[in-house]
Image (spheres, helix red, strand yellow):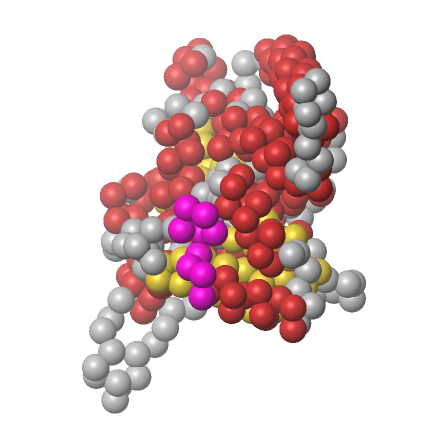
Amino acid sequence: MLEKENINYERTVVVGIVTQNQSEEKLREYLDELEFLTFTAGGEVIKRFFQKMERPNPKTFLGTGKMEEINVFVREHQIATVIFDDELSPSQQKNIGKILNCKVLDRTNLILDIFAQRAETSYARTQVELAQCQYLLPRLSGMWTHLERQKGGIGLRGPGETEIETDRRIVRDRIALLKEKIKTIDKQMSVQRSNRGAMVRVALVGYTNVGKSTLMNVISKSEVFVENKLFATLDTTVRKVVIRNLPFLLSDTVGFIRKLPTQLVESFKSTLDEVREADLLLHVVDISHPDFEDHIASVNQILQDIKSHDKPTLMVFNKIDAYQHQIIEEDDLMTERTRKHYTLEEWKQTWMNDFGHKNTLFISATNKENFEEFRERVYEAVRQIHITRFPYNHFLYPDYQDAEE
């Protein structure tokens, strides 16, 4: 159960579908994540709805019967918001809103709302606003339904059409302005990066809420904002870190998520320049999460999208203190043993073995468990990059054990 603070949460229901490409088990995982997203945004999920379909209904996403079932529940339980796990088309959103007569959001809209809440700096706010405008543009027509009844004769075309076109022009102009603003800030940030000298750059990457900011705080002794909610960090934070006598730059970047809205990928690509320009990636994984393998695949896909998948990488499996495997009772012989029943030692003998002993780490950032080994591995990886770049400096930075002495 999610711990709820003493504030008024918006009553919501979440909705998804089971298809040939998305099993019921996979949908439950997505709805778990959607519920956490809703909680992060300030909502309380009262009920989940799902339907098995070959493909989404092009008009209302769900079938007529299921829509009526949700409609009855919404009215009887005073639900303020209905959130769909997949992105709705503008027409679907409009049609569903007419049937349910309440606020209708999709996963993209929800993530954009969380980003808007979390944006602290001018740069983050600009990026989020750009993504919101790009999402809003094709959906403007649904906002002028109150003017549909006003018809005009010759020379008096309905004001609805005029209002929509005026708003579209305003939004397009705003998008162009925001893109120019981001370009200007990008140039400034590029100058800042070039002024950092020749220090090795290390970037923390990973799924949202895996403990990147906690790890950043521990290794750099800084105070980066940490919270057990999704997308606690939006702005990239860069700190100078020294292990033994070797300095390098460590950056904490925005977390990734499955089904990441295309608008956010586009507008936040500039934020991910820290990842693109990094010499070494620390891919942080929450090994206590049951879907951590899916999380790794999602992060790797985004790294590939931004052409950063071939960089030297250390896989850092965090939260080993919270890892629990399911134990099969001796008398339960019919239970098929799956990956849920693996111990940590058994996981280490799977595909994780392919990364090699030097490229995988198992730690707890909160408890600083195996932290000395983490420091040693990072030191050696950074040292290797540094002395490859500056061979004449190799005597300044000996092996970790020699430096310790």
The residue lying at 69 percent from left, 68 percent from top is 78
- Left or right, 305 with respect to 77, comes to left
Q: Position of residue 217 (x, y in %)?
A: 64, 43
Q: Nearer the viewer, residue 14 or 338?
A: 14
The residue lying at 25 percent from left, 89 percent from top is 331
Magenta range? 57-65
Q: Nearer the viewer, residue 4 or 207?
A: 4
Q: Position of residue 68 (x, y in %)?
A: 52, 66
The residue lying at 38 percent from left, 37 percent from top is 300
Q: Position of residue 12 (x, y in %)?
A: 63, 62
Q: Is residue 206 above or below residue 78?
A: above
Q: Is residue 6 above or below residue 95?
A: below
Q: Is residue 175 above or below residue 282?
A: above
Residue 260 in sight here:
yes
Quadrant of the rendered image containing residue 212: top right
> Would residue 61 be counted in the magenta stretch?
yes
Q: Nearer the viewer, residue 13 or 26?
A: 13
> Would residue 242 be counted in the magenta stretch?
no
Q: Position of residue 134 (x, y in %)?
A: 58, 28
Q: Quadrant of the N terminus?
A: bottom right
- Residue occupying the far front of the picture: 154
- Left or right, 293 with respect to 133, comes to left
The residue lying at 54 percent from left, 14 percent from top is 198
- Residue occupying the far bottom of the picture: 331
Residue 178 in sight here:
no
* Count of numbered circles on the image: 0
Instruction: Give the dominant element type of the magenta stretch: helix, strand or loop.
Output: loop
Q: Nearer the viewer, residue 6 or 42?
A: 42
Q: Is residue 359 above or below residue 290?
A: above
Quadrant of the rendered image containing residue 391: top left
Quadrant of the rendered image containing residue 296: top left
